[in-house]
Amino acid sequence: MVTGQLFMIQENFKINNKPASNLAFNHLSIQFSLDGFSFCVLNKDEKKFIALYNYHFKETNQTPQKAIDNITKLFGTNPLLKEKYHSVNITHTNNLSALVPKPLFQEEKISSYLSYNNKVLKHDFFAFDELENHDIVNVYVPYVNINNFFIDQFGGFEYKHFSTILIENLIDIYKFSLVPHMFVNVGATHFEIIVIFNRKLQLYNTFEYKTKEDFIYYILFVTEQLKLNPEKFELKLLGAVEKDDELYNIAYSYVRNVSLIENRSKYSFSDDFTEDTKRHFFTLLHQF
């Protein structure tokens, strides 16, 4: 079953007084996992985000083939996915990734980097992203059959792992900060912790959680391991979190400087984009 929500769309959806069918100079960003699919449209002429859709796949025991079936239905029913775009970026969201220092990376040994903390199958295909200006290589397993589906739809596109988008943008936005920052990107059942100070990535990891106690436990564990002072570092929350919800409040009980991440996009947004939406879809809105 596919459930979806239109988060916002610019009124009348016109580009330079042209109807919605003329999207040839606009950018499409897609982010997907086995249980969900989101996309947004960036009007390059106006430098404005004008539409964002989010879908959730409710089946249990998700597989790449089930995801293709669901995505195919979306392409058959959503007219914006049938259009031609000037450029398309696609982000794979999964936990099949590992960061490798660039001086140690050898492409011929790419499968070995994931075998330490993931179950790697014999026929898996491996890809990697170079994090620009950071001497880091992100090795991951993309969903090849889903990529092939997108090739049939768009011809060509660029794709990356979602953690590449997340890490690159956070480092670039906060590279001049003089204090350590911990970022927590909250999902429904897991979250990512990214720690940056001295203009460098100090930690990236994914944690599963069920309760707010699980949530704060891992934050404090990372704090202790990296010898961060809870009175001094800044904790920035993004993703599926809002001010004064239970995750925000428990974090504020243990860390002095807690806040929701600010919108610092160089693009503008149609009026229907709320601050919560910009924060929730941070990676989707920064993959261009």
Image: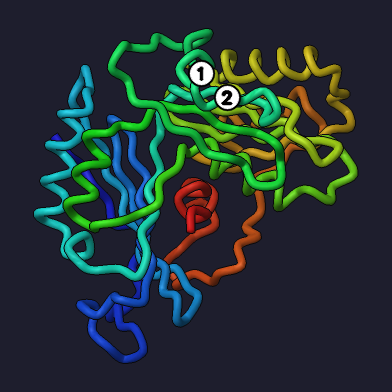
At a point 66% along the width and 45% down the height, the residue shown is 170
**Position of residue 266 measured from the top left corner of the image (x, y, whole percent):** 61, 67
- Residue topped by disc 2: 106
At x 21%, y 67%, the residue is: 83
Q: What residue type is labelled 2?
A: Gln
Q: How far apart are marks 1 and 2 (CA)?
A: 6 Å
Q: Which of 134 and 190 is in front in this view?
A: 134
Q: Is mark 1 on a helix, strand or loop?
A: helix
Q: Residue furthest front?
A: 108
> Are discs 1 and 2 less than 8 Å apart at CB?
yes
The residue at 26%/38% (across/down) is: 56
Q: Residue 216, which numbered label?
A: none
Quadrant of the rendered structure where residue 251 is? top right
Q: What element carries label 2?
A: loop
Task: Identify the residue at image location x=19%, y=44%.
Answer: 149
Q: Residue 109 carries which label?
A: 1
Q: With respect to residue 153, does 65 lie above or below?
A: above
The foreground one among 279 and 111 is 111
Which amino acid, mark 1? Lys
**Residue nearest the viewer, comparing 202 with 70:** 202
Tell me if mark 1 has few (under 14), some (14-19) or many (20+) residues whose alpha carbon lies within 10 angstroms of its own: few
